[in-house]
């Protein structure tokens, strides 16, 4: 029997992390090339007269750049030792160690990339607990959707599949299925079953949130937050260029709606967990 976890909650993250890693490598390579070109311009013909010993010892620019590139490429490894066969049990339904490992690796990659930027080490014990709690929450939502006899229409399934293809920049469903087969070991039947479960959970969250159409005040507040973040990231303060409110309005609507749905989902999980039989074995 297929385990009823909701893969699409992690799908965008996993695939975007893979793409980000590729972009980071390309960016690192481009930076090294630019650095090498600048060094060459500054040193002129003297760069061609390096001694053989310098080349052998790697004391030249190339050796230094290779060392820096090697350091940048180093990534911490996820600690998956001692993960039990059954990580958690939710009302008699088991969350397997393999399912946990798959989710944890995706979350860890993102945390490790952030760690490289901030210099702070990943707290793997804390991250493991967060992933386990997330999987428990997903299972609770799945069970509640089934308890309410929610059904997934073919139209909604097709729409969700189309969204996943577009969100992950694939050209077709076949490309998406191939990527999931290679990265997650999931065949098409498993993918479609997971999408059906996701559609049911989406309906469940819709029932909980009701009308989540953002107000004009909420959109303006989100816009001001976006402007502040842009100013902080660019280092230009109030001089940072930001698209107008009207230009950003469609994206802001989606952002606020997603935030409201996430809050409703979390509140429902907390309520369901109060009356659930949950055990975590980490």
Image (spheres, rainbow, N blue to C red):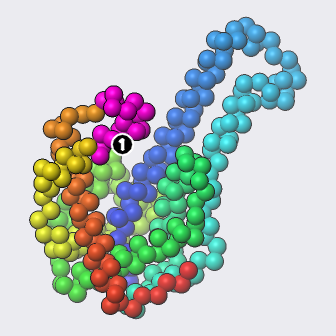
Residue 178: name its quadrant: bottom left
Which residue is the site of mark 1?
Answer: 229
- 254 left or right, relative to 133: left
Residue 50 to residue 115: above or below: above
Look at the numbered disc 1 and give the secondary structure of its residue: helix
Vertical relation: 228 (above or below) 265: above
Image coordinates of residue 270 in percent, x first then y, are 33, 79
**As drawn, which residue projects farthest toward the top?**
45
Residue 53 sits above or below residue 195 on the image: above
What's the residue at 70%, 12% (across, down)? 43
Residue 210, by quadrant, is: bottom left
At 28% across and 33% down in the image, what residue appears?
Answer: 242
What's the magenta bit mostly, secondary-structure-wise? Answer: helix
Q: Which residues are magenta?
A: 225-241
> Left or right: 129 with respect to 217?
right
Closer to us: 163 or 47: 47
x then y, percent, for residue 6: 34, 71
Q: Is residue 196 in view from this perspective? A: no
Query: In which quadrant will I find the N terminus?
Result: bottom left
Residue placed at 58% from the left, 59% from the top? 122
Q: Which is nearer the eye, 149 or 262? A: 262
Q: Residue furthest right?
A: 53
Answer with the quarter of the image where residue 232 lies: top left
Asked whether 174 falls inside the magenta stretch, the response is no
Q: Quadrant of the C terminus?
A: bottom right
Tell whether 49 sits left or right of 234. Answer: right
Near-viewer residue (131 or 70): 131
Residue 17 shows in this picture: yes
Q: Residue at x 64, y 73 (%)?
A: 81
- Residue 239 part of the magenta segment: yes
Measuring from the top left, give residue 67's x and y in whole percent: 72, 36
């Amino acid at each position: 029997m297929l385990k009823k976890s909701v893969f699409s909650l992690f799908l965008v993250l996993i695939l975007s992390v893979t793409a980000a890693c590729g972009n980071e490598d390309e960016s690192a390579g481009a930076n090294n090339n630019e650095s090498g070109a600048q060094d060459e311009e500054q040193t002129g013909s003297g760069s061609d007269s390096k001694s053989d010993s310098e080349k052998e010892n790697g004391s030249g620019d190339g050796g230094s750049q290779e060392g820096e590139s090697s350091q940048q490429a180093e990534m911490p490894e996820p600690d998956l030792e001692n993960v039990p066969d059954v990580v958690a049990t939710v009302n008699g339904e088991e969350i397997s160690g393999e399912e946990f490992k798959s989710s944890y690796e995706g979350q860890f990659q993102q945390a490790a990339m952030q760690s490289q930027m901030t210099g702070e080490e990943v707290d793997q014990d804390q991250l493991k607990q967060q992933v386990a709690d997330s999987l428990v929450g997903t299972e609770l939502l799945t069970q509640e959707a089934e308890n309410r006899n929610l059904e997934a229409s073919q139209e909604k399934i097709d729409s969700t599949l189309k969204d996943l293809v577009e969100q992950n920049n694939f050209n077709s469903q076949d490309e998406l299925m191939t990527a999931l087969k290679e990265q997650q070991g999931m065949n098409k039947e498993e993918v479609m079953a997971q999408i059906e479960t996701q559609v049911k959970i989406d309906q469940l969250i819709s029932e909980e949130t009701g009308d989540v159409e953002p107000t004009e005040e909420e959109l303006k507040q989100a816009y001001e937050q976006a402007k502040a973040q842009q100013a902080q990231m660019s280092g230009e303060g109030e001089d940072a260029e930001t698209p107008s409110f009207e230009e950003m309005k469609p994206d802001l609507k989606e952002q606020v709606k997603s935030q409201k749905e996430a809050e409703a989902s979390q509140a429902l999980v907390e309520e369901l967990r109060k009356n659930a039989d949950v055990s975590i074995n980490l």
